[in-house]
Amino acid sequence: MAAPEKIPAEQRLGYPTRPIVNPVTDTVGTTATLILRNNPDRIFWLAVNLSSNKGYIGWDAQVSSTRGIPIAGNGGFVSCTLEEDGELTIHEVWAVLENAAGIFYIVEIERR
């Protein structure tokens, strides 16, 4: 049965959305790993570092400890939203871990 009215997110945005979990990969290596592709329909993403290793997030394959946003191990996270971060939200995102490959939990919300 369909909802009698639009859900709050759809009311606020004016269009329906959908979540996508780990759209590219859930494994991040010790070399730059693409975790999100360029997506003009993406309005939000969240990346959670589930490994015990410190990592970094960046917007190109040169992401590193000197060229990226730190993301702590054991649940550290980075998020990006269209309203606050603008165009960065839709661009591809890369990640790297310091000592060993590990798992990230990545969720993006995109316009349907």
Image (cartoon, rainbow, N blue to C red):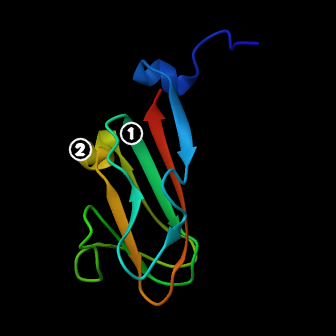
Q: What residue would you read off at disc 2?
A: 87
Amino acid identity at mark 1: Arg
Local packing at callout 2 (Cα closer than 10 Å; few below 14, some 14-19, many 20+) is some
**Circle 2 sits in a helix, a strand or a loop, which is it?**
helix
Number of residues whose C-alpha sits closer than 10 Å to that of mark 1, classed few (under 14), some (14–19) or many (20 or more): many
- Place of residue 17 in the rendered image (x, y in percent of width and height, measured from the top left): 50, 29
Distance from Cα at disc 1 to Cα at disc 2:
10 Å
Total marks drawn? 2
**Residue with the most extreme bottom position:** 99
x and y percentages locating residue 86 in the rendered image: 25, 43
Residue plotted at (41% across, 24% down): 13
What residue would you read off at disc 1? 42
Quarter of the image for the N terminus: give it: top right
112 or 54, which is in the foreground? 112
Please say if 32 is above or below 78. below
* x and y, in percent, of residue 106 in the image: 52, 57
Is residue 68 toward the left or the right of residue 74 in the image?
A: left
What is the secondary structure assignment of the residue under circle 1?
strand
* For residue 2, above or below residue 106: above
